Image: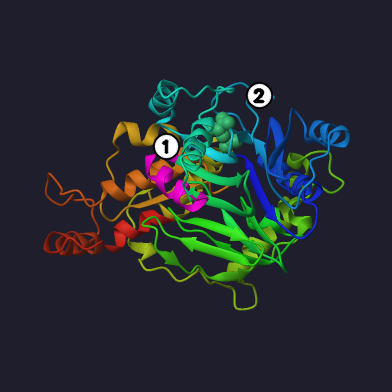
Amino acid sequence: MCGIIGIIGKDQVADRLVDGLKRMEYRGYDSAGVCTVQDGQLIRRRAEGKLANLVRELAGNPAPGTVGIAHTRWATHGAPTTSNAHPHATGEVALVHNGIIENFKPLREALQARGRSFESETDTEVVAHLVSEQVEAGLSPQDAVMAVLPQLRGAFALAIAFRQHPDLLIGARLGSPLVVGYGEGETYLGSDALALAPLTQKIAYLDEGDWVVITRDGAQIYDSTNNLVTREITTSGVTAAAVEKGNYRHFMQKEIFEQPTVVAQTLSSYIRPLEQTVALPQMDFDLSAIDRITIVACGTSFYAGMVAKYWFETFARVPVDIDVASEFRYRDPVLQPGGLALFISQSGETADTLAALRHSKSALPRPRRSPVSSRCSPRSRRILRSKRASSAPTRSMRSSNI
Ligand code: GLU
């Protein structure tokens, strides 16, 4: 997980881009970089290690311009070095990327065969070359992006700057999050609303497969079939304090000290102490009819899942399986109708957990090979019967989407 920010603004952007990166420190990073566009040049500054190194680099080598992109990297392909740090730039474009381009190898080989040479070990650099190639062939930035996106497999959030087009930035997302922020005569791209908190509260969340052209006047959003679409602009309630480290030494310390408040806030959303009742959110399935729970998560979320297993089994007497997300889809788990699958991710972006969720959604409608299990509740049997009668999604299938 890494952080992306892009600004097309009225004033200089480099300092504000770096401030945005600081607000995304909680996402982790091993290098950082900025690229601005000015006078037909892509002005790129990068540094490995802490953000302070990038700040030092910019102090000696400023990056002037009112349009730019920036990135904190969490390396997946290639060592955490300056040459692998984003933004990656070719002749015409610079871009930042959150995610993994799974088919980068064949794309890279094809680009090399066409005479293009690479300066990094990353999967990301192929996208810079592919877009640049189209722009060099005479396509507009929009047409170039439209030509390239269908070639990419994997997960990405991208922010792309164009050497000869200081009047726009293009963003795209599939599997990794990207938001558009609306300011006064300025428009922003960010990995999340938190990154843009001090710049604007007016946020549109891009849908899967969307791509967007931002200018100083606003944004044009297109869906995966290149139709112009409207995404709701919401007012984000996030404050900068929610993501800043404050006086804590590190984010883990902040999270430890925040635990009592977070637990109290969570409980108070559901518990009515005066009436001595618990008010759970409205669900479109019957919680009491669930006869098996599968929890899927990674890392700390996996440990949280183990606690949940203990509580579900002790108090609700419902059997719980718990799986590490990275193993889940490879062992082709048996997901029974009437069961509930829970996917836990602190960031909401854990690639393996999201892949496991997608796997479950696609696996559930499979025809059953055996008769209804004797363990199924009467409700589950009803679901199964209706499932045989229709291929429409059942409630139990939707319940996997939690
Ligand atoms: N896969 C890219 C890289 O290794 C992006 C990683 C990230 O999301 O920070 O550079």
Residue at the spot of label 2 = 83
The label shown at residue 323 is: 1
* Element class at badge 1: strand
Q: Which residues are magenta?
A: 140-154
Tag nearer the camera, 1 or 2: 2
How busy is the neighbourhood of tag 1: few (under 14 within 10 Å), some, or many (20 plus)? many
Q: In the figure, 348 relative to 386: above or below?
A: above
- 242, above or below 57, in the image: below
Name the residue at 51% across, 59% down.
206
Q: Nearer the viewer, residue 385 or 212?
A: 212
Q: Is residue 2 above or below residue 285?
A: above
| Between 160 and 204, the one nearer to me in the picture | 160
**Magenta stretch containing residue 144, yes or no?**
yes
User: x and y percent of residue 213 in the render?
Assistant: 55, 57
**Sooner in the amino-acid sequence: mark 1 or mark 2:** 2
> Identity of the amino acid at label 1?
Asp
For residue 284, which quarter of the picture?
Answer: bottom left
Marks 1 and 2, Cα distance to the nearest angstrom? 37 Å
Residue 215 in percent (x, y) is at 62, 61
Q: Is residue 397 magenta?
A: no
How far from the left and from the top, in percent, is residue 241?
79, 56
Question: Which residue occupies 42% across, 32% down?
Answer: 102
In the image, 324 versus 174, the foreground residue is 174
Apparent side of residue 69 relative to residue 247 in the rendered image (left or right): left
**Left or right of 39, for residue 179:** left
Q: Quadrant of ligand 1?
A: top right
Q: Secondary structure at mark 2?
A: loop
